[in-house]
Amino acid sequence: MATQNESEEVRGLEGVIALSSELSSIDGEAGQLVYRGYDIHDLAENASFEEVVYLLWHGDLPTQSQLDALKSDLRTARELPAPVIDILRQAPDSAHPMAVLRTAISALGLYDDEADADSPEANRRKATRLLARTPGIIAAYARLRNGDEPIDPLDEASMAYNFLYMLNGEAPGSAAEATFDTCLVLHADHGLNASTFTSRVIGSTLSDMYSAVSGAIGALKGPLHGGANREVMRMLLDIDQKGADPVEYVQEKLASKERVMGFGHRVYRTMDPRAAILRDRVQELSEERNATKWYDYSMAILNTVKSEKGLDPNVDFFSASTYYMMGLDPDLFTPIFALSRSAGWTAHLLEQWADNRLIRPRAAYVGKTGRTVTPIDAR
Ligand SMILES: CC(=O)SCCNC(=O)CCNC(=O)[C@H](O)C(C)(C)COP(=O)(O)OP(=O)(O)OC[C@H]1O[C@@H](n2cnc3c(N)ncnc32)[C@H](O)[C@@H]1OP(=O)(O)O
Ligand SMILES: O=C([O-])CC(=O)C(=O)O
């Protein structure tokens, strides 16, 4: 039994080691992220999202036949149950797409005969169904709210290609597919971040995978976590609309003690390696198109926040302009994050259940003591 003094509080659990994991490691001082021993730069350059999913779920990169089998399983599993499509049809057009995704993932559990089956094999099958169906949910809702019908994915295409295809109804170029695939690789796992911790807490009660992933989506939605990518784009658009100087705009925010979205991180004390990869991608996209506005604003903000607050950008800062330059709607940015992070959440759940112990910390009680009940008519 742990012996921490009951009155000691570690605010926000900063630095607390709550469990052991073989999935990803972060060196916050060096700015290094590793999935199962592979550096994120290596994976971003040389592995597809599907290969990373296999790596997270199984521990090693797949052989060609293992990858083919995974892709075939994902293809077979991806059709959405009709009642879930009905839920998407009935969701208000103005709903937050993360709320829609959370609801739809929860509803998937209603139509999965194995929802409460707890064997490792059943949990792997559910992880496959859950990940396979997430792109279709996000794309279908994005189309339905615009009055368009959902589009079926293609048989032989990658998840990155199919997501963009289902969303836009046209074939994405190979550069767009590659950029999107890299984004999925970069967001797939990140230690015991808030949403992953949420999923493991829920999983540790031996609740089911749909409950745990719905809870994780709820945690990711917040602007201090995955929701920051949408807020970053809102800030860039606001600067543009007002014709504001990005340096002055951000200086004003800092002077009024507002947080600048996309900066700071609980673990990194230097540049998030994913932000560096995405910064370079935004620069390339900008130069290819001869349209450097978003990159220029972003770099002006980066330099200002760094010099005034000493803060570096996190993954959400440059994913915003990357997605926007790909024509994606800002309120889909966080659902896209969730699509990728589902790989990590489900891998963490499989790991949790392989050696489960209920996660249940303590609170330091700082409330009143020694009170006695006064009869209600005398209060
Ligand atoms: C995928 C992800 O989840 S990455 C994170 C995405 N979230 C964001 O980009 C939101 C903006 N960033 C933040 O709010 C924070 O940096 C967090 C929540 C990510 C991490 O914060 P924590 O480790 O809890 O640091 P904490 O909130 O205690 O902040 C420490 C100090 O830095 C300041 N600070 C931290 N981030 C920012 C920011 N983005 N803008 C301005 N000030 C900031 C805080 O105001 C605080 O200053 P103070 O000591 O003068 O009060
Ligand atoms: O790790 C964190 O605290 C936030 C997160 O999920 C990430 O950076 O990808």
Image (cartoon, rainbow, N blue to C red):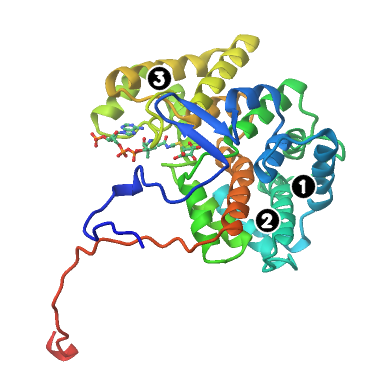
Q: Position of residue 121 (x, y in %)?
A: 74, 59
Residue 50 visible in the displayed image: yes
Q: Quadrant of ligand 1?
A: top left
Determine if the C-beta at disc 2 is less than 8 A from ligand 1.
no
Mark identifier at residue 88: 2
- Name the residue tied to disc 1: 150
- Name the residue tied to disc 3: 302
Foreground of the two, 73 or 293: 73
- Judge left or right: residue 269 versus residue 80: left
- Judge left or right: residue 364 versus residue 95: left
Who comes first in sequence, dot 2 or dot 3? Answer: 2
Mark 2 to mark 3: distance in Å? 38 Å
Residue located at (75% from left, 68% from top): 113
Disc 3 and disc 1 in contact, CB within 8 angstroms: no
- Judge left or right: residue 377 versus residue 259: left
Disc 2 and disc 1 in contact, CB within 8 angstroms: yes
Residue 245 visible in the displayed image: no
Disc 1 residue crowd, few under 14, some 14–19, many 20+, Cα 10 Å: many
Choose mark 2 or mark 3, whichever is in front: 3
Q: Position of residue 26 (x, y in %)?
A: 48, 33
Q: Amino acid at mark 3?
A: Leu
